[in-house]
Every structure is written in structure tokens, then in C-alpha cells.
């Protein structure tokens, strides 16, 4: 039973480029969450999605960041025109569709902006 | 074990001893709490959870205690092993605010053989 999958595991971008991070939830999970983690800090919520719907994006920066979870395929977190401050680990979590359930995390994508 | 910004508080224990990691949460409306373990370079791994209608829950070698009066959560690890060395985070889910988790700053557990 595969867990949450994220790719790439490591991503290097130059300032101004775009970063695309992908997340496939656990089988049977229809809720996806994205979090960002800076070194030596806790995770910070960014966005919560269900299939084809953004439920809560209160943690997303207003510019350059977007997320989607299409009917088919993985969830995508997209960062346009990256800046050095975007360097962080980005984690995806998924949970089952019933109420308030445990979120299970993927291995993360470590983004480095040069 | 609360957040202190860039420098994680560290708990150092001897192998075989019991460990207690503490967490103060912020919102009295929080009704679901989770402890995660994070090893270097990996994602957070679920350890144990507790809902606000309980004050204690036990798993294998781990116990979570919830004190809603003082908004305090603790994780007890029995017979700590070197493989328990990691950063531990508590996370809270705030009642009607949806499913987002709010994480504490983490505590680094170091187990000495």
C-alpha cells in the first residue's frame, strides 16, 4: 500500500524560473494538503484541496503561488518566478474523505533557489 | 518543548530511559491533536493522535496526555531507543477552522547509547 508520493525529491531552480511540485495522495484519500518547512522550524500550512476544488488557501502567498488537484493525476504546487526566499522543504499530506482524520505526509520536495 | 524559533529545544536521554516531550498549544477551540516524528531528510511520520474528549491515549511504547485546562500536550516514550532520535512535533486541528494543522516548533530528541 503506497504512501503519499512526492516528486521530485530535490529541485534546483535559478531565480525567476518556475517550480512545479507534484503530490500523489495515498490510495483512497481525496484530501490533499501542502505545507512548507524552513530549516529547524515546524511546518506551515499553505493550502487544502479536494479533487477539482480549493477548500482553504489561507496559508498561500497571494502572488506567484498556485495549487491544483485535478480530477485525474497528482496535485501540483506551482511557484512562478522563484526567489531565494522560496527555498524550503515542501510537504504534501493526504487524508481520507470522512471528517477530521489523520494527515499522512509524503517525503517532501526540497527546493533550492540559486 | 515549545518553539523557540531557529534553535530547536533538545532533550537528551539515555537509551532505555523514558522520554517526555511537551507541547503548549494556542487555541482552546482545538479538538484534535497529533504527534509526528521527523527524521533528518524525511517527512513527518504519524505517531499517535488524541481527540479533545479524551485526556490520555496509549500506543505501542507511546502515551499522549492532554490537559485542556492549561492547553498542554505531552508525548511519553517508554524505554527510549536510538531509533527514536528525531525531531518531534505536536500539531493541533482547530475545531471549525477546517482541516489545516498548526504545528508547534518541535523538540529534538537525542538518545545516547
Image (cartoon, coloured by chain):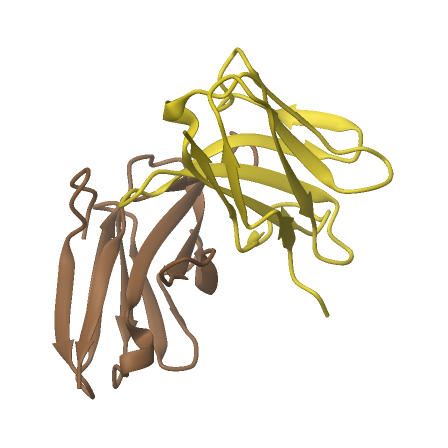
Chain colours: A yellow, B brown
Q: Can residue B100 be seen in this view?
A: no
Q: Residue at x 14, y 65 (%)?
A: B11
Q: Which quadrant: the C terminus of chain B?
A: bottom left
Question: x%, y% of residue B86?
Answer: 30, 65
Between A112 and A68, which is closer to the camera in this rendering?
A: A112
Question: x%, y% of residue A64?
Answer: 55, 15
Left or right for B36, reference B69: right
Between B17 and A79, which is closer to the camera in this rendering?
A: A79
Between B38 and B99, which is closer to the camera in this rendering?
A: B38
Q: Residue at x 20, y 88 (%)?
A: B16
Question: x%, y% of residue B71?
Answer: 26, 45
Between A39 and B20, which is closer to the camera in this rendering?
A: A39
Question: x%, y% of residue B101?
Answer: 46, 41
Left or right for A74, reference B80: right
Tally the marks. Answer: 0
Left or right for B47, reference B21: right
Q: Which residue is drawn at 57% across and 30% down?
A: A47
Left or right for A94, reference A89: right
Tell me where residue B103 sits by quadrant.
top left
Tell me where residue A114 sits by quadrant.
top left
Q: Residue at x 54, y 16 (%)?
A: A81
Q: Is residue A113 visible?
A: yes
Tell me: residue A18, above or below residue A42.
Answer: above
Residue found at the far top of this picture = A63
Residue found at the far right of this picture = A72
Amino acid at each position: 500500500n503506497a504512501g503519499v508520493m512526492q516528486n521530485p525529491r530535490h529541485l534546483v531552480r535559478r531565480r525567476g524560473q518556475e517550480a512545479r511540485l507534484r503530490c500523489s495522495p495515498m490510495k483512497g484519500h481525496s484530501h490533499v494538503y501542502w505545507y512548507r518547512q524552513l530549516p529547524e522550524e515546524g511546518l506551515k500550512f499553505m493550502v487544502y484541496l479536494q479533487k477539482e476544488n480549493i477548500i482553504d488557501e489561507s496559508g498561500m502567498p497571494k502572488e506567484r503561488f498556485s495549487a491544483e488537484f485535478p480530477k485525474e493525476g497528482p496535485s501540483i504546487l506551482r511557484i512562478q518566478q522563484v526567489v531565494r526566499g522560496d527555498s524550503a522543504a515542501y510537504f504534501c499530506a493526504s487524508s481520507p474523505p470522512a471528517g477530521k482524520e489523520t494527515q499522512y505526509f509524503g517525503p517532501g520536495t526540497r527546493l533550492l533557489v540559486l | 518543548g515549545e518553539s523557540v524559533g531557529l534553535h530547536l529545544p533538545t532533550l537528551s536521554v539515555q537509551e532505555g530511559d523514558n522520554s517526555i516531550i511537551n507541547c503548549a498549544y494556542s487555541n482552546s477551540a482545538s479538538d484534535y491533536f497529533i504527534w509526528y516524528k521527523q527524521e533528518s531528510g524525511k517527512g513527518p511520520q504519524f505517531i499517535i493522535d488524541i481527540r479533545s474528549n479524551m485526556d490520555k491515549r496509549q500506543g505501542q511504547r507511546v502515551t499522549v496526555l492532554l490537559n485542556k485546562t492549561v492547553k498542554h500536550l505531552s508525548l511519553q516514550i517508554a524505554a527510549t531507543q536510538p531509533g527514536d532520535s528525531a525531531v518531534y512535533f505536536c500539531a493541533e486541528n482547530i475545531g471549525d477552522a477546517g482541516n489545516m494543522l498548526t504545528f508547534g516548533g518541535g523538540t529534538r530528541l537525542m538518545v545516547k547509547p
